[in-house]
Amino acid sequence: MGVTLILGFLLHFLIPAFVKLASDIFNPIQLQDSHTLIWTMTAWAFIPASLIMRGIAMLRVGQMIALQREQAYLRTQEEDVIPV
């Protein structure tokens, strides 16, 4: 859960470095080409944002599950108590 949040924040810095590395390795990729620039900017914007949203959603679901488990545990504790 926390990994997706960290990765979402770090990808803003890693995606441009990866594209530059890919353009050095693969000769046909030209960073000045408008098509490459559009796809790089799209990946730079949407991939980290989706990872951050996914991480937040997973944290919220985890909190909901923990709350439900705690409530179920308290209910079973109350049912096990025999009134005197």
Image (cartoon, rainbow, N blue to C red):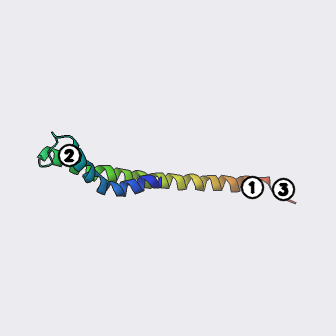
Pick out the residue farthest to the bottom.
Answer: 84
Residue to which mark 1 is pinned: 77
Mark 3 or 2, nearer chain start: 2
Q: Residues within 10 Å of mark 1 (few under 14, many from 20)?
A: few
Residue at x 29% of width, y 50% of height: 46
Separation (CA) of disc 1 from disc 2? 64 Å
* Badge count: 3
* Residue that numbered label 3 is attached to: 82
Q: Earlier in the sequence, mark 1 or mark 2?
A: 2
Between 30 and 24, the one lying in front of the other is 24
Q: Amino acid at mark 2?
A: Asp
Between marks 3 and 1 in the image, the one whose residue lies nearer the viewer: 1
Name the amino acid type tagged 3.
Answer: Ile
**Disc sitting over residue 17 in the figure:** none
Q: Give how far apart the Cα atoms at labels 3 and 1 are.
A: 10 Å
Residue 59 in the image: state x and y as whole percent: 48, 55
Q: Secondary structure at mark 2?
A: helix
| Residue 41 appears left or right of 64 | left
Q: Residue furthest right?
A: 84
Decide: few, some or many residues near mark 2? Use Cα within 10 Å; few <14, some 14-19, many ≥20: few
Where, by quadrant of the figure, is residue 71 drawn? bottom right
* Residue named by callout 2: 24
> Which quadrant, please, contains the C terminus?
bottom right
Which circle's residue, 3 or 1, is located before the other in the chain? 1
The residue sitting at the front extreme is 25
Q: Amino acid at mark 1?
A: Gln
As helix, strand or loop, the secondary structure at mark 1 comes to: helix
Q: Would you say 9 lies left or right of 43 here?
A: right
Reply above or below: 49 against 28.
below
